[in-house]
Image: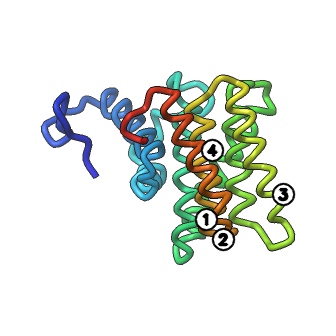
Amino acid sequence: VELSGKAMDEKEMVFAPASRVTFTLVKTIVSSLFGRYELGAHLAIEKGEQQYLKMKGGIVWAQTLWFHRCLCVFAMARANKTKERKYMAQAKRIHKELTNSLKNKNPNVLHYVSLLNAEKAALNQKKYQEDDVRKLYNDAITMSARGGYVHDAALAQERFADYLLNIAGDFHEARYHIEGAIQRYTNWGAMGVV
């Protein structure tokens, strides 16, 4: 998948190392927000940009990037059971870094960690844990919304709807949450996701 449109065409871009990193960051976040989890997971596993994107220090948007990378990898682990181990190893590493950041008193990642906890529980879910998974997703939605992260609340609601539809088999609640996600994205001002 390439990014192209009226403003730019990825094929025509010439990248310096710093601009390549910024472009990779944007492409990863866009992949996550538009449900292109396979591309986001590929970018998360790709090693070329890792030296520029350190969790401790590095670029300002590092935690946002790592959140979206981790979300894409968790999503692909759920969607592609044959490659689940490959994706889970990467997801666990990134999830641990974000959790450690939260333990080190970084309040800006609380809603990220909350959604990633739900994604991880959904992958490790057994039938008797379904209520726990639902609670984790609802907590992630609430935490994001209360923190003013409307787009992240929408993303959490979208991921919850995916879980409900494809894992729990609850079509009616899945529909409720996808409609809620659409409303939150609309409130955020998104036109492409909606």
Label 4 – label 1 distance at C-alpha: 14 Å
Coloration of the structure image: rainbow
Q: Residues within 10 Å of mark 1 (few under 14, many from 20)?
A: some
Q: Nearer the viewer, mark 4 or mark 1?
A: 1
Label 3 – label 1 distance at C-alpha: 17 Å
Q: Earlier in the sequence, mark 4 or mark 2?
A: 4
Determine whether label 3 and label 2 are within 8 Å by CB. no
Evaluate whether residue 46 shows in this view: no
Mark number, residue 165: 1
Q: Which residue is mark 2?
A: 169
Label 3 – label 4 distance at C-alpha: 15 Å
Q: Which residue is mark 3?
A: 132
Q: Nearer the viewer, mark 3 or mark 1?
A: 1
Mark number, residue 156: 4
Q: Position of residue 182 (x, y in %)?
A: 52, 41
Label 2 – label 1 distance at C-alpha: 5 Å
The amino acid sitting under disc 1 is Leu
Mark number, residue 118: none
Q: Position of residue 89 (x, y in %)?
A: 62, 61
The amino acid sitting under disc 4 is Ala
Q: Earlier in the sequence, mark 3 or mark 4?
A: 3
Secondary structure found at label 1: helix
